[in-house]
Amino acid sequence: MDELDALRKKRLAELQAQAESEHVQKEQVEQADAQIKQILSQILTPESRSRLATIKMAKPEFASQVEMLLIQLARSGQIQGKISDAQFKALLAKISKPKKDFNIRRV
């Protein structure tokens, strides 16, 4: 019985350590998200933030790439002031992949 109790205590300690590390990781992710939101609110107008939120709902991976690009541009000093919706559209047009056209001919 002593071995069983020792194994139970060891397993309990492992689970507690794992739960604590997951909690720390979750807090770090939340802090990073808060920093990203703060930076984006400083460089985007409400209209362009709304457009980014719409993109995030449709294409979350692309929205994350756009967010990282905006943060890099802001940190490097290439963004002066807030980005308007028209400027944001132009930036999206530059970085988005061109759409493929399909023509169907019926004979």
Image (cartoon, helix red, strand yellow):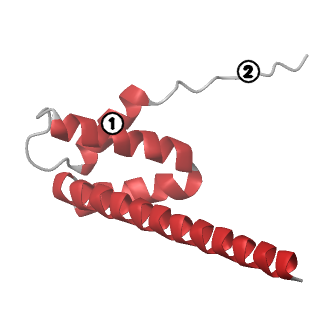
Q: Quadrant of the N terminus?
A: bottom right
Task: Residue type at mark 1: give it.
Answer: Leu
For discs 1 and 2, the disc positioned in front in the rendered view: 1
**Which amino acid, mark 2?**
Asn
Q: CA distance from mark 1 to mark 2?
A: 34 Å
**Residue 92 picture quarter:** top left
Q: Residue at x 22, y 35 (%)?
A: 73
Q: Residue furthest front?
A: 2
Write down the residue under mark 2. 103
Q: Which mark is residue 69?
A: 1
Could you tell whether 7 is left or right of 46 in the image? Answer: right
- Residue 64 horizontal side relative to residue 79, left or right: right
31 vs 9, nearest the viewer:
9
Which residue does the image show at 53% across and 24% down from the upper left? 98
- Asked if marks 1 and 2 touch (Cβ < 8 Å), the reply is no
How many numbered circles are shown?
Answer: 2
